[in-house]
Image (tube, rainbow, N blue to C red):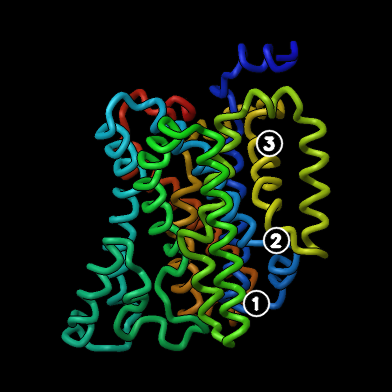
Amino acid sequence: MTTSVQHALSSNNIKDNNFDLLRFVFASMVFLVHSYALSQAEFLKPLAMFISSELAVKSFFVVSGFLIFMSFEKSVYIGTYFSKRVKRIYPAYFTVVVLCALLGIIFTEYSLAQYFSLTWLKYVLANLIFLNFIQPDLPGVFMHNPLTAVNGALWTLKIEVMFYFCVPFFIWLMRRFGRWQILLAIYLASIGYRIGIETWGIAYHAPIYKELLRQLPGQLIYFVSGAVFYYYLPYLKAYWKPVVVFAIAIMVTNVLIPLSLLEPLALAALVVSAACVLPFLGNFGKHGDLSYGIYIVHFPILQGLIQFGLFEKFPMLGFAIATVLVLCAAYTSWHFVEKPFLAKKSHYLVANT
């Protein structure tokens, strides 16, 4: 083992990291792209041209892979691990789903009796168990918006939850059959799924293949790439300069020539390097971890303002109001919903003090 790797191993401390900042950036990217996609306001069009919400979601999965594997490895009991995961995501998720269902009465074109129907109940129950695709709409709500879904951003949460259940099994396999062997097998299996689905979809002209690619097996490649750099972080720290250069070259080439086998690892290398290798950029989350709140509240806020015609009549004002409302809602969610459920020793709280 070289001296540089030995030094990296001995200083493998990620207490001071930039994950809070990165998550805020990724959540903001999704919000900005959706601002244009939902409103079709012309002045927002450059956002969709130069910012990729798809890249942001992939990066979120990379971060999740890194942090969730770390969470399990640092949990004494499996129950502790699942308790931490539930407390981190479900209180705010539950609150947003229920509030949207209740506040939908303001936006619906139906009567009170028509609104609180079986469809309303189906929306609440399906969304509370992360099956958003079963009932994405509320009765009579956002009927004349370009998209009628109440909160289209929530589709990633069901994948995130499934990741949580996969991690204990994956780690059991790694401890039994070898870490790199299992990580490689999962990576290749996800690649195989993506290639198979895409080939089938194109051959049989089945547009649904694009939706299938977004589901768990297809996204697993980004999640496991984050795990790779969690376990082999010392090597990334030791050789980060050539790794980053190579990763940038892959990402740039991927724009012109698809490199599906290497792109997830390249993206993970860049994300984890920005979080754990670059200098600590300060305690960005000292006022709260707003990223999760931004992600789960921005969509219905945009939809509401669009229904009221604000983006159509005063697009810049609509965007400004949406930004303020999203940030205020995220701040409120963190301090009054998310934070109270977290243990005092949670790294989310430690990072935000």
Q: Which one is nearer the viewer's eye here, 147 or 104?
A: 147
The residue that disc 3 covers is 274
Disc 2 marks a residue whose amino acid type is Ile
The residues bearing labels 3 and 1 have C-alpha atoms spaced at a distance of 32 Å
Q: In this view of the protein, can residue 30 be seen by the observer?
A: yes
The residue singled out by tag 1 in the image is 41
Image quadrant in which you'd find residue 343: top left
> Between marks 2 and 3, how big is the CA–CA gap?
18 Å
Q: Residues within 10 Å of mark 1 (few under 14, many from 20)?
A: some
- Compared across the picture, whether 307 is left or right of 59 comes to left
At label 1, which amino acid type do we have?
A: Ala
> Can see residue 348?
no
Report which quarter residue 28 is drawn in. Answer: bottom right
Residue at the image point whose x is 16% and y is 85% from the top: 113
Residue highlighted by disc 2: 51
Q: Position of residue 73 (x, y in %)?
A: 41, 28
Q: Secondary structure at mark 2?
A: loop
Q: Are marks 2 and 3 in contact (CB under 8 Å)?
A: no
At 57% across and 24% down in the image, what residue appears? 14
Residue 211 sits above or below residue 226 on the image: below
Residue 70 located left or right of residue 134? right
Q: Secondary structure at mark 1?
A: loop
Q: Residues within 10 Å of mark 2 (few under 14, many from 20)?
A: some
Specify the amino acid type for callout 3. Answer: Ala
Q: Single out the mark in the foreground, 2 or 3.
A: 3
**Residue 11 image point, x, y percent:** 62, 14
Element marked by disc 3: helix
In space, the residues marked 1 and 2 are separated at their CA atoms by 16 Å
